[in-house]
């Protein structure tokens, strides 16, 4: 397998308007530019932890394609950031024993950009497009015939000088990755033969991922410390490894050790203002704001105005985990705390009163 190129750049990497959150599953500039998580990338399906059903389905499709000596069907991978969509795409190319060209939809600004990518492909190769839901309409329409008939239908010139040209393409595989399946148009979505949702990881799977990475970076991680990190990683490997690196920094700089105990985990996370539920300041402000309103439902825009944050950031970054752990619920009238959310806020208030 060879990765030909990556057109992801710093300008395309999302970041919070006010601060970078350690528990945000979106990739940050440091991770993209230094590629310091690449050590954790598996080299085969056997090394990939979790997503067993998806791996099984993909392995059957890959083996069938190799048996028929055909390109794999176009594949769409969707799910929250940080769950391994890019890693799976690269592993597919490894299992198919072919090259993979990597691109990001925001960097494909003009139709000629996608034309260049397609013309650079050879028989059986893979084109991986991250954030495929962000392709512009003209670029997307060029993909229709490329995916279905392996040809490019180009219109050149203007007015009376307009002429059409058809270019045949080698049979290739397009792998698209998205965090917003609903934002992909039906004509594009229907052209993918394989479509898989990447699920959140279990604590046991995250425990194994964290332990393996700790070994790679020469950390002695105690079992209970590893379990504690897994529980607050929001089901997301990217967050788990990011938390582990912050713990490593604390242990090496403050404690001058590579041995990570549960006590060090707690102190390191406390220094980053992350509690034992994995919640940070923005999460707690969100919950406290709901609590101040006597738990009457509050609209998202009102919460955003009260917290000084963007409503889209709250909806897609903060809320999913709070809903996942049962602290808030969405109602037709707005957001409100659950009994678990009330209990959490009450316990924190009692703790501060005692302190």
Image (spheres, rainbow, N blue to C red):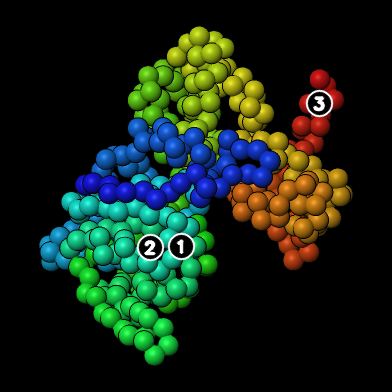
Secondary structure beneath label 1? loop
Q: Residue at x 50, y 14 (%)?
A: 252
Asked whether the residues under the numbered discs 1 and 2 touch, taking CB atoms below 8 Å apart as contact, a structural biologist would say yes
Q: Residue at x 45, y 14 (%)?
A: 258
Return the mark for residue 352: 3
Secondary structure beneath label 3? helix
Can residue 128 be seen here? yes
Identify the image quadrant of residue 174: bottom left
* Front in this rendered view, residue 250 or 208: 250
Q: Residue at x 60, y 26 (%)?
A: 269
Identify the image quadrant of residue 350: top right
Could you give the CA–CA distance between mark 1 and mark 3, rounded to whole angstroms? Answer: 51 Å
The x, y position of residue 18, in whole percent, is: 68, 41
Return the residue at label 2. 113
The x, y position of residue 21, in whole percent, is: 61, 38
Secondary structure beneath label 2? helix
Return the residue at label 1. 109
Disc 3 crowd, CA 10 A, few/some/many (<14, 14-19, 20+): few
Could you give the CA–CA distance between mark 2 and mark 3, rounded to whole angstroms? Answer: 56 Å
- Against 239, residue 185 (above or below) is below
């Amino acid at each position: 397998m060879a990765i030909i190129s990556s057109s992801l750049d710093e300008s395309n990497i999302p970041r919070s308007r006010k601060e970078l959150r350690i528990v945000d599953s979106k990739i940050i500039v440091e991770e993209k530019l230094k590629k310091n998580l690449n050590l954790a990338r598996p080299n085969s399906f056997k090394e990939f932890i979790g997503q067993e059903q998806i791996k099984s389905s993909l392995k059957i499709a890959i083996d069938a394609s190799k048996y028929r000596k055909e390109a794999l069907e176009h594949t769409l991978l969707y799910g929250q950031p940080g769950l391994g969509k890019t890693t799976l795409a690269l592993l597919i190319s490894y299992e198919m024993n072919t090259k993979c060209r990597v691109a990001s939809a925001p960097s494909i600004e003009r139709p000629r950009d996608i034309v260049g990518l397609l013309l650079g492909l050879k028989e059986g190769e893979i084109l991986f497009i991250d954030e495929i839901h962000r392709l512009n309409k003209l670029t997307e329409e060029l993909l229709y015939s490329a995916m279905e008939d392996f040809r490019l239908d180009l219109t050149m010139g203007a007015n009376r000088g307009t002429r059409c040209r058809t270019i045949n393409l080698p049979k290739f595989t397009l792998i698209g990755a998205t965090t917003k399946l609903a934002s992909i148009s039906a004509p594009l979505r229907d052209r993918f033969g394989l479509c898989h949702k990447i699920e959140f990881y279990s604590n046991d799977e995250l425990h194994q991922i964290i332990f393996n990475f700790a070994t790679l970076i020469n950390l002695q991680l105690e079992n209970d410390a590893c379990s504690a990190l897994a529980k607050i990683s929001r089901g997301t490997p990217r967050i788990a490894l990011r938390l582990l690196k912050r713990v490593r920094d604390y242990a090496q700089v403050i404690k001058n050790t590579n041995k990570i105990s549960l006590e060090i985990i707690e102190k390191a996370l406390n220094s980053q203002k992350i509690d034992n539920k994995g919640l940070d300041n923005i999460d707690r402000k969100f919950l406290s704001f709901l609590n101040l309103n006597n738990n009457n439902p509050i609209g998202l825009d009102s919460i955003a105005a009260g917290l000084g944050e963007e409503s889209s950031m709250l909806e897609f970054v903060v809320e999913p985990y709070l809903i996942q752990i049962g602290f808030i619920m969405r109602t037709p009238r707005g957001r409100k705390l659950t009994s678990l959310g009330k209990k959490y806020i009450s316990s924190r208030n009692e703790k501060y009163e005692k302190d």
